[in-house]
Amino acid sequence: MSQYPILADESIMAPKAHGTTESRVIDNLRWGCDGRIGDNICSFNRHYAEPSGYFESKTSFLQEVDRDNTTTFYDSVSGKPLFIAPVGRTFDEFLAESRAHGWPSFRDQEVVWENVRCLPDGEAVSVDGTHLGHNIPDRKGNRYCINLVSCAGREDQAS
């Protein structure tokens, strides 16, 4: 049995000052992600997602991402690092899997476990209550399908 995902109970998503988080998403999300969509998905949502393919069709992610090095994906509310990808695979493999499923798809080794948890139903969340997406395991193991608007924060926003 895998040591991942690290589970949390429902209390992590208890109501806070701004839905399930203490504050709203930052105003200038990376890759041109829509802050209104981000705020709704991150703080006032437990089940829904940005539209499939959003990361390709509605953002500058593919034009701006560094295809030769890893990229750190930060919580859109807290600024904490959530994912570092690609790790253990190429960017092209990361992109192919993400395109096949419609959302950026991360594996266990790409998760910053200090800041990410899963609920027993598969919901992936930050330790601060940001809804990220879901763990949808496949034959290769855990696969975290994550809303780009949830991990488009900036390193310099963290307090």
Image (cartoon, rainbow, N blue to C red):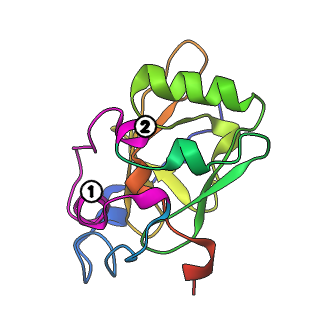
Residue 12 spot, x, y in % from top left: 37, 64
When the figure is inspected, residue 155 is found, relative to residue 53, above or below; the finding is: below
Callout 1 secondary element = helix
Q: Amino acid at mark 1?
A: Ile
**Residue at image point 54% right, 41% down:** 62
**On the image, numbered disc 2 is attached to which residue?**
56
Q: Quadrant of the C terminus?
A: bottom right
| N-terminal label among 1 and 2 | 1
**x%, y% of residue 10?**
31, 57
Residue 136 place in picture, x, y as percent: 43, 28
**For the residues bearing labels 1 and 2, Cβ distance under 8 angstroms:** no
In the picture, measured across the screen, residue 87 lies left or right of residue 150, that is: right
The quarter of the picture where residue 112 lies is bottom right
- The disc label shown at residue 41, or none: 1
The local secondary structure at tag 2 comes to helix
Q: Is residue 1 visible?
A: no
Q: Is residue 13 left or right of residue 109?
A: left
The amino acid sitting under disc 2 is Glu
Magenta stretch, residue numbers = 31-57
Q: Residue at x 75, y 28 (%)?
A: 89
Residue 88 — which label? none
Name above or below for residue 91 compared with residue 9. above
Q: For mark 1, does the 10 Å Cα neighbourhood hold few (<14), some (14 to 19), or many (20 or more) residues?
A: many
Q: Is residue 16 visible?
A: yes
